[in-house]
Image (cartoon, coloured by chain):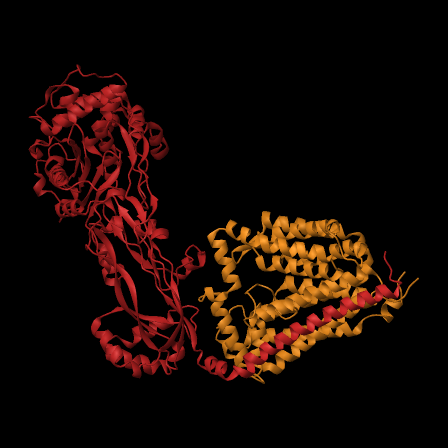
Amino acid sequence: MTEFSKNQERDWIKQRFIGVSVCILFVFALLFLRLVYLQIIKGEEFRLLSEKNAVRLKSIKSSRGLIFDRNKKLLVDNRPSFNLKIVLEDAGEVKETLKKLAQLIDIPFDELMDSISQVENSTVYKPILLKNDISRNQLAIVEAHKFDLPGIHIDIEPTRYYIHKKTAAHLLGYLGQINSKELKTGKYPNVKSGDSIGRYGIEKQFETYLQGKRGGRQVEVDVSGRIIKVLKTVKPVAGLDLNLTLDLDLQQTAEKLLENKAGSVVAIDPDNGDILVLASNPSFDQNDFIGGISQKKWEALMSDPGKPMVNKAIQAEYPPASTYKVITSFAAIEEKHINIDNTEYCPGFLKYGNRTYRCWYKHGHGDMNIIEGIAQSCDVFFYRAGIKVGVDKLAQYAMGSGLGKKTGISLENEKKGLIPTSIWKKKRYKEQWQGGETLSVAIGQSYNLVTPLQMAVLIAAVGNGGTLFRPRIVRTIKDGYGVLVKKIEPEITGGLPASKETLKIVRKGLLKAVQGQRGTAKKIRLENIEIAGKTGTAQVYSIKKNDKRKTEEMKYSLRDHAWFVCYAPADNPVIAIAVLVEHGEHGSSGAAPIAGALIEEYIKGSLSKKTLPE
Amino acid sequence: MFDRRLIKYFDWGLMALTILIGMVGLGILYSALTAGNDSGVVHILFKKQMIWMCTGFVVMMIILMIDYRDLDKINLFIYALCIALLISVILFGKIGGGSRRWLLIGFVRIQPSELMKIALIISLASVYSTSISQAGLNFRKLIKPAVLCVIPFVLIVNQPDLGTGLLLLLIAGSITLFVKVERKVLYTVSGICIAAAPLLWYGLKPYQKSRILTFLNPDRDPLGAGYHIIQSKIAIGSGMLTGKGFLKGTQNALSFLPEHHTDFILSVLAEEWGIMGCSALLFLYLIFLFWGLNIAYNCRNMFGSILAFGITTMIFWQIFINIGMVMGLMPVVGVPLPLVSYGGSSVITNMVGFGILLNISMRNFSSN
């Protein structure tokens, strides 16, 4: 321990303490002088500013990223909207002001009051939204009377605009106002109460990219809240633009073809899994959701029997019907139960156990091989194939082909369908699997359920030689200057459980289904373009043997669903399509013509216009 | 055996001063939390602060029981304990305001970076008390103190809490300059710092640069820090000579002032009590600082002298940075105003500091 003894050292220490004291005094003098400057010299000025609460922040809304189709055509835009707001602090007598305003622009007074009382944690100087998107007439009236309406102002802010009403509504999605619960999660750091966020579709899935960053202004305002001076500005940053794989023209054609029907169309580029069309009908107008959909419109949407809010391409599950014969063929050939030379005789029915299973063609197809079996969709041929393969092997091939699981498209609530197995039945119904049920499974009529998207991905894989792709909807994400931010590459999720030889046989059958003399879809043949496809007619209600009513007489809701899956050109496909028309009755007449029209437009169209670079 | 002289020499003046500043602080906090709130209910944060103050007082009393000279012996243990706490913040810390600063022990949230300040001061006092000389310290003698500073600095800056990290360096730097370094060392170190700054700058990522630039110039962030400073200046200025009166501050009531009960609390005082109130508080702080220096000067033990000086320096820098920031003279850093700002860790840390000062003061009678 060092103890001080010498006077000299004491003096040295003393000097150092004097130095420190001087420093402290100097700093405190500085602080005091600053107080004098702020409170005495500038005091008057600051007192005035404080009494009016005159320096405020005004937030500037950023514009959301745009959405383009594959050919750079704009699908979703922003437009200016005039938003009526109030700052309570400046409004004086709030009720008086609102009464005046209500009279002038013909909005019920109660509605205006409600919008104020609904705001949580309101502060008197923060603008509260009274009415979104007022008309130009209302704008003109408010501007003309602005001196009678203290505290009322109009902000021009970007709002979402869906250019093509109802087009690809399920894919693009819509926006909705953020609620206080979501705000509290902290997932949306740039979103304020009153802002909209994606609620459905791409708008929701790509929210983080589409959402921009708010800017703001420091402003000085006068007594009634009008801006006198802008002190500082921070510009908002616009959200990122999305370039989709969607083809707008083809999508619109598909939607037109689905008009007055319930169902969906999915078209995929077999080379990379790009979604060209994803249509679901009936649809809805996304513009109705901006600023909150009215109760009446919402109820109408919810009570519509066509279920417009369901994306039928990914959320509706149907029995695959005869389109499933593709799977049964894979299994039967790969498991060596049949080969190209085998023929089976179809008398129009098959007795199994003590039941008779009928072929859709009651007169019988006669001798059938695998290729003709696919082309003419002979049920008896596939009953026999199914019996040989067995339900569990069939399920294995179906799962391998991407059925019974999600395709992985970047959209919410995709359904995975259902592929039955004997174990599944035991778990689900506590019953043994019945041999006869395998017959139904083999022709896609039992418990099996698939989505149109799954069938599109499957048929695309058949077309491209066996590669299953994850469906891609967004190709690139770019900023407003066109600088690439993110590129989404095609993603292979697997391969079909079928050898080249097997695929060759199945493809031949599919080709004959359209191009052959006895093909089930021969009516949609096109000049110069060979199509390969498979029809399907999914029973909604099994017709009793002696029911002689014609389908036209049957109730709409009991009529069969019509399926058609195809790709074209058959030898080197550029498009693969799955069509499902609910209660469309026959695949050949209800669904196939839609695909035919799309193929014609797409292939002829792409001859005239060059494919655009990424 | 308890020495009666401990009571005889007890520093009642410093104790009274501490209590006085604490009371003033509670008054300001009461206004900050109550103004504009008609319900008449005492704010829960006010009650919490009372509890913190009482806890701090008890901690202070406990510290009086230990002879400060024992701290010299266990200084490295205290230092290591605080470093361990800082590391556990990285591992299990609670995130608050975008950084990991808090540690939850039972029901109590503690901020180890605050305690680290005291630990570092004790360790530096211990090292310097043996190496101090009139000629000043040379490089070799500075290696150990430098290491002692750098470890906590790196840990705290990574939380990230740049403000507290820099405060730590300021305190350490002040103590080092006070015990004197060789002129050669002073020049070389300053030279290296100036030369290294640009190199470091280019090594930073753009967002880090932006953060530092905003730190130095709040106007770069007119919607955040810049706006806070403007509102703070308006609030202070509008107080004028005598202020608007207790609980009458409008800026405060309208919540124009962010953080008005923590870092920006001085603006509440300034708005309601004017330059009179602010000068009074400055004066109280000034007396306190000189009192602390006096204890350091009169201490016959070199360790105690440097320790008292270090604690005083810690209080000084907090006052200067906080008031400077609130008045727009300094970068916006989260440094609280001692005994006035709301916050448990800050209250406890400062109380521990005062406890050490009292401790040194009362044991300064000439024994042996």
Whether residue A194 can be seen here: yes
Count the labels in the image: 0
Q: Is residue A27 left or right of residue A286?
A: right
In percent of width and height, residue A444 lies at 22, 31
Q: Nearer the viewer, residue A499 or B76?
A: B76
Against B294, is A367 above or below?
A: above
Task: State the residue at coordinates (49%, 73%).
Answer: B231
Report the residue that reaches farthest toward the right: B368
Tell me the orange chain. Answer: B
Q: Is residue B57 left or right of residue B249?
A: right
Specify the colour of chain A.
Answer: red
Task: State the residue at coordinates (52%, 77%).
Answer: B235
Against A103, is B289 above or below?
A: above
In percent of width and height, residue A197 lies at 34, 57
In percent of width and height, residue B285 lies at 68, 73
In percent of width and height, residue A279 lies at 20, 45
Q: Quadrant of residue A515?
A: top left
Against B190, is A125 above or below?
A: below
Report the residue that reaches farthest toward the top: A341
Image quadrant containing the N terminus of chain B: bottom right
Image quadrant containing the C terminus of chain B: bottom right
Q: Is residue A210 left or right of residue A40?
A: left
Task: State the residue at coordinates (16%, 48%).
Answer: A252
Task: State the residue at coordinates (50%, 60%).
Answer: B213
Against A496, is A564 above or below?
A: below
Whether residue A291 can be seen here: no
